[in-house]
């Protein structure tokens, strides 16, 4: 089973990685777990004008590396083969499109914001659930 796990550095996303690792071990799957981290760089277009596109990309890469660090440690400790994908763009859309390209399951953390905030701006988890054609498991 090919599992895509969205990682953003939160406790919920780390719980999602732990769940995916346990699931993979329980299924005795030899497939690789893929961790994906996505940053919406739309708001950084102004910064690109002042510091350059390369500096913004370096910043996002460093941020992604920090967010992936604890998740990678979980997979290494469990002895699970893994890959990482680092992307920029609309977070939910990128996760959904990536999942639809060869994964069997998406696992992501649900941060549990208030219902009012989700109604007003929507959460990444809700948008992935709505747009992804693959099964999605939300972990708190």
Image: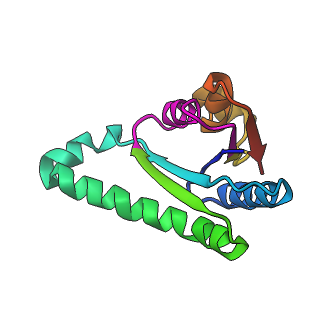
Q: Quadrant of residue 24?
A: bottom right
Q: Is residue 51 visible?
A: yes
- The spot of residue 95 in percent (x, y) is 54, 37
Near-viewer residue (62 or 123): 62
Looking at the image, residue 84 lies above or below residue 87: below
**The magenta stretch spans residue 103:** yes
Looking at the image, residue 46 lies above or below residue 65: above
Find the residue positioned furthest to the right: 26
**Magenta-drawn segment:** 88-107
Residue at 69% over, 58% down? 17
- The spot of residue 68 in percent (x, y) is 53, 63
Residue at 62% over, 29% down? 127
- The spot of residue 99 in percent (x, y) is 58, 35
**The magenta stretch spans residue 84:** no
Q: Is residue 9 visible?
A: no
* Image color mode: rainbow
Q: Quadrant of residue 25?
A: bottom right
- The spot of residue 125 in percent (x, y) is 66, 37
């Amino acid at each position: 089973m090919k599992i895509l796990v969205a990682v953003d550095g939160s406790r919920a996303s780390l719980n999602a990685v732990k769940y995916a690792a346990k699931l993979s071990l329980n299924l005795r799957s030899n497939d690789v777990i893929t961790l994906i981290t996505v940053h919406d760089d739309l708001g950084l277009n102004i910064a690109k004008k002042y510091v350059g596109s390369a500096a913004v990309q370096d910043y996002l890469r460093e941020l992604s590396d920090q967010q992936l660090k604890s998740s990678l440690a979980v997979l290494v400790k469990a002895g699970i083969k893994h890959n990482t994908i680092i992307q920029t763009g609309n977070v939910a859309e990128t996760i959904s499109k990536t999942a639809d390209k060869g994964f069997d399951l998406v696992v992501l953390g649900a941060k549990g914001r208030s219902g009012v905030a989700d109604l007003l701006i929507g959460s990444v988890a809700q948008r992935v659930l709505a747009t992804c054609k693959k099964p999605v498991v939300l972990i708190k």
